């Protein structure tokens, strides 16, 4: 007998709840996008191969969309990212097709990529896909620079344990654990 996730009822309730559309102020959107680009550049700068691949795409504009949220970025000659001008025409559009935030969280916890509609430059899309597949952020290493190796390792272990518990609670399989069926 197949069991249904208890979150599907909650998701259905939230989708049918008549909430007013709340638009964040423009300055908040601007600041969040700026911070996202800074974080992406921090991660990219730790991988020389990633920056060299991205440098080959200098001047190319990528638009990433999910629902009404959009971020337009341009590759720089240094192999990093910058926010593109609002009127810049994207060379590549990546639109996440999943509308449900809960479903996106479940996909992320499984370690899968969300379904994305891709339009535009095929070579740029291949480079972006390579970056997504090969570049990882070592948060524990960055944290160790601030609080030291032992506390950072302990926090990293605690975070991995919580993530595993959350995956098991949601019924998703842990990476490398094919015997547990995913929801």
Image (cartoon, rainbow, N blue to C red):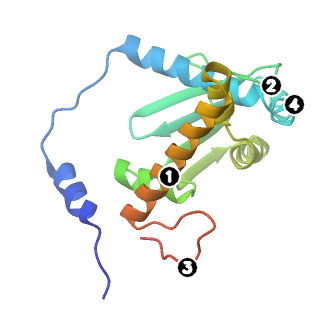
* Mark 2 or mark 3, earlier in chain: 2
* Mark 4 or mark 2, earlier in chain: 4
Q: Is residue 37 left or right of residue 81?
A: left
* Mark 1 or mark 2, earlier in chain: 2
Q: Residue at x 52, y 54 (%)?
A: 114
* Mark 1 or mark 3, earlier in chain: 1
Disc number placed over residue 52 in the picture, else none: 4
Q: Secondary structure at mark 1?
A: helix
Q: Is residue 116 above or below residue 64?
A: below
Label 1 to label 2: alpha-carbon separation: 35 Å
Q: Is residue 139 visible?
A: no
User: How many other residues sit within 10 Å of disc 4, few (<14), some (14-19) or many (≥20)?
Assistant: some
User: Can you identify the residue that label 1 sits on?
Assistant: 161
* Mark 4 or mark 1, earlier in chain: 4
User: Can you identify the residue that label 3 sits on?
Assistant: 179
Residue 125 coordinates in the image, percent (x, y): 71, 45
Disc number placed over residue 46 in the picture, else none: none
Q: Secondary structure at mark 4?
A: helix
Give the number of the mark in front: 1 or 3. 1
Of 57 and 6, which appears nearest the observer?
6
Q: Is residue 62 visible?
A: yes
Label 1 to label 3: alpha-carbon separation: 19 Å
Q: Is residue 70 above or below residue 1?
A: above
Hey, which quadrant is residue 51 in on the image?
top right
Give the number of the mark in front: 4 or 3. 3
Q: Is residue 111 left or right of residue 183?
A: right
Give the number of the mark in front: 1 or 2. 1
Residue 8 coordinates in the image, percent (x, y): 26, 63
Q: Residue at x 55, y 79 (%)?
A: 179
Disc number placed over residue 79 in the picture, else none: 2
């Amino acid at each position: 007998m197949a069991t249904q996730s208890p979150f599907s009822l909650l998701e259905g309730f939230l989708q049918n709840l008549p909430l007013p559309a709340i638009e964040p102020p423009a300055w908040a959107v601007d600041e969040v996008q700026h911070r996202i680009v800074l974080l992406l550049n921090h991660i990219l700068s730790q991988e020389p191969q990633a920056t060299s691949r991205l440098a080959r795409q200098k001047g190319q504009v990528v638009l990433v969309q999910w629902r009404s949220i959009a971020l337009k970025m341009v590759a720089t000659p240094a192999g990093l990212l910058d926010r593109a001008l609002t009127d810049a025409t994207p060379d590549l559009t990546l639109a996440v097709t999943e509308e449900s935030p809960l479903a996106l969280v479940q996909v992320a916890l499984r370690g899968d990529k969300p379904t994305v509609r891709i339009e535009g430059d095929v070579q740029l899309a291949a480079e972006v896909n390579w970056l997504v597949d090969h570049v990882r952020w070592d948060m524990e290493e960055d944290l160790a620079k601030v609080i030291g190796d032992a506390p950072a390792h302990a926090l990293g272990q605690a975070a991995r344990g919580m993530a595993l518990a959350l995956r098991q609670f949601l019924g998703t399989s842990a990476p490398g654990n094919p015997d547990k069926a995913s929801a």
